[in-house]
Image (cartoon, rainbow, N blue to C red):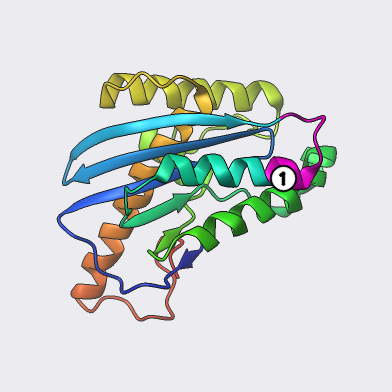
Amino acid sequence: MTLFSPAPLVLPPATVVIGIDPGIAVFGVALVRLHGRSVDVISARAIRTNPACLLRDRIQLIKSELVAFIGASQPDLVCIEDQTPGQRGAQRQGHRNASAENVRRVIGLCEGLFVCPILEPTPAQVNRLIGLGRSRVKLSSEAARKRRKAAVRAWVSRVLGFEATSKDAADAVAVAVMGERIWRSTRAKCARGETRSTERIGGVS
């Protein structure tokens, strides 16, 4: 997970977080307010693009829809799920990774929209949040990806009491919650002097 911090690393007691499950075909986004263990999902949706359209038009659509979704919310933190596969994952996914650079372009677009800190929680970290832990299921397979997204959606419904309109929107909610927990944990360690600015802690640098 990568940390971008163009703003001071300070969060208020109640934190407004944007969660993002990035993609070209479907782009999940959520607006969540967290205060301690209390989680209020303000809104969540999936932005869909037409594969018949030019890439630049699809990215522009995502940008305009994202700007409209954010509105005047002024988030304290943005969490974008890390889409970078490992070496083995890249070999298994084959043609799916042909669009990886396009997804990175979308993530770069997102980063340019915010002046607050940005985190990139990994799928493995989100799995731990919802109780999947170190699943032995190979998440590179299409069936496994669908099962994971269904598990995330069920967790959002059962634990947070929010009925997401799509699996991608639910993913964005879980990414927001996990990212905020990582952020608070890291800040607490920094306050206790347990970390240095150049030290990686739980994927935060």
**Crowd band around label 1 with a 10 angstrom C-alpha radius: few (<14), some (14–19), many (20+):** some
Residue toward you, 23 or 128 = 23
What amino acid type is highlighted by mark number 1? Gly
The C terminus lies in quadrant: bottom left
Q: Write down the region rendered in magenta.
A: 50-59
Q: Quadrant of residue 145?
A: top right
> Which residue has dot 1 on it?
89
Whole-percent x, y for residue 178 in the image: 36, 45
Instruction: Look at 71% across and 28% down and name the residue there.
Output: 141
Whole-percent x, y for residue 130 in the image: 38, 32
Instruction: Look at 22% across and 44% down and name the residue there.
Output: 34
From this viewpoint, is residue 42 visible?
Answer: yes
Residue 52 within the magenta-colored segment of the rendering: yes
11 with respect to 22 (left or right) = left
Q: What count of labels does the image hold?
A: 1
Residue 92 within the magenta-colored segment of the rendering: no
Establish if 12 lies above or below 82: below
Instruction: Look at 60% across and 22% down and name the residue there.
Output: 146
Instruction: Look at 31% across and 40% down and name the residue there.
Output: 32
204 with respect to 189 (left or right) = right
Q: Secondary structure at mark 1?
A: helix
Establish if 119 lies above or below 194: above
Residue toward you, 117 or 50 = 50
Residue toward you, 42 or 127 = 42
Whole-percent x, y for residue 73 in the image: 32, 48
From this viewpoint, is residue 131 visible?
Answer: no
Q: Quadrant of residue 114?
A: bottom left
Whole-percent x, y for residue 181 in the image: 30, 51
